[in-house]
Amino acid sequence: MAIPEPYRRNFETLLRAAADGNLALLECRDALTGVPRYVVTAVGRDGDDFVMTPFGHLHDGNPFDAYLPPDPGDGPLPRA
């Protein structure tokens, strides 16, 4: 299964931020529900301002219950 290029670039950005010590875990609120989310965020600078780029939130509960590992026999996933 091929991972689309934009996702690969975002992952590379995330790895660079981690290597540079520029990651943060922020408590945010879900935009639709208002539920607290703990968001993995890259921290950058724009002049004197901090720029926070969210990459994803930590999963509530057991993530093994929420995701299925890739199955090579399934072929590519349909695109939304």
Image: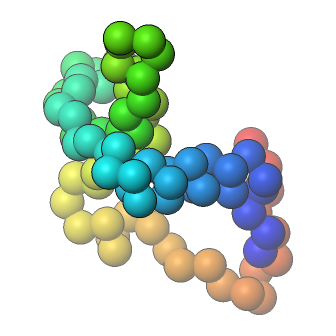
- Give percent across and percent down for residue 30: 30, 25
Quarter the N terminus occupies: bottom right
Side (left or right) of 72 relative to 22: right
- Residue name at image x 31 percent, y 66 percent: 63
Side (left or right) of 47 relative to 70: left
- Give percent across and percent down for residue 78: 79, 56
Q: Is residue 41 above or below residue 21?
A: above
In this view of the protein, can residue 40 be seen by the observer? no
- Residue name at image x 24 percent, y 23 percent: 29
Q: Which residue occupies the foreground of this view, 3 or 75?
A: 3
Q: Which residue occupies the foreground of this view, 51 or 46?
A: 46
Q: Is residue 77 above or below residue 69?
A: above
Q: Is residue 11 above or below residue 51?
A: below
Q: Residue furthest front?
A: 47
- Give percent across and percent down for residue 67: 45, 67
Q: How many marks?
A: 0
Quarter the C terminus occupies: top right
- Residue name at image x 35 percent, y 44 percent: 22
Task: Answer with the quarter of the image where residue 18 lies.
Answer: bottom left
Side (left or right) of 53 relative to 57: right
Q: Residue furthest bottom?
A: 73
- Residue name at image x 44 percent, y 12 percent: 47
In this view of the protein, can residue 52 be seen by the observer? yes
Q: How is the image coloured?
A: rainbow
